Image (cartoon, grey):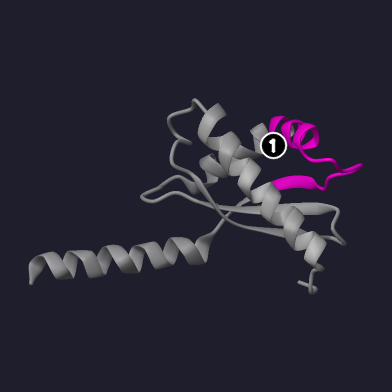
């Protein structure tokens, strides 16, 4: 990923904050409750945003990402209303596998601590 400008970093932070708020307030699907955004990355010369997500204890990550990608047009519409930008990149949700692996390590350490 190329180095981003301060204005791009601010835009990504705003998108992260707004999407987090939208996901908390507007998602009623119980399978998606508790999904959090771990990072926002611009790809393809800033024409697409990868929104990396994670949910603790999630077993069916593919179904979670598919559901979020089906909701992406709604999120994009809400972002266009909230952000004073002429054009926003397309949104694509991705599962944050390294974050998931870190969660597994923490679970193992927690179980070890309980057994001691």
| Residue drawn 69% across the image and 35% down it | 75
Inspect this view and state whether residue 67 appears. no
**Front position in the image: 79 or 100:** 79
Q: Quadrant of the N terminus?
A: bottom right
Q: Position of residue 101 (x, y in %)?
A: 42, 66
Q: Which residue is mark 1?
A: 72
Identity of the residue furthest to the right in this view: 86
Verify whether residue 83 appears in magenta.
yes
Q: In the figure, residue 73 lies in which quadrant? A: top right
Residue 95 located left or right of residue 30 = right
Residue 65 located left or right of residue 57 = right
| Residue drawn 33% across the image and 69% down it | 105
Q: Is residue 29 above or below residue 56?
A: above
Q: Is residue 28 above or below residue 22?
A: above
| Residue drawn 60% across the image and 38% down it | 68
**Front position in the image: 101 or 41:** 41
């Amino acid at each position: 990923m190329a180095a981003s400008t301060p204005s791009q970093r601010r835009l990504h932070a705003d998108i992260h904050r707004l999407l987090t708020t939208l996901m908390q307030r507007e998602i009623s699907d119980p399978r998606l409750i508790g999904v959090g955004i771990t990072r926002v990355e611009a790809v393809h010369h800033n024409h697409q945003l990868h929104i990396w997500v994670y949910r603790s204890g999630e077993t069916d990550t593919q179904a979670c990402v598919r559901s979020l990608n089906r909701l992406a047009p709604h999120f994009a519409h809400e972002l266009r209303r909230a952000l004073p930008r002429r054009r926003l990149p397309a949104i694509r949700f991705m599962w944050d596998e390294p974050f998931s692996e870190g969660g597994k390590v923490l679970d193992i350490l927690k179980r070890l601590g309980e057994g001691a």
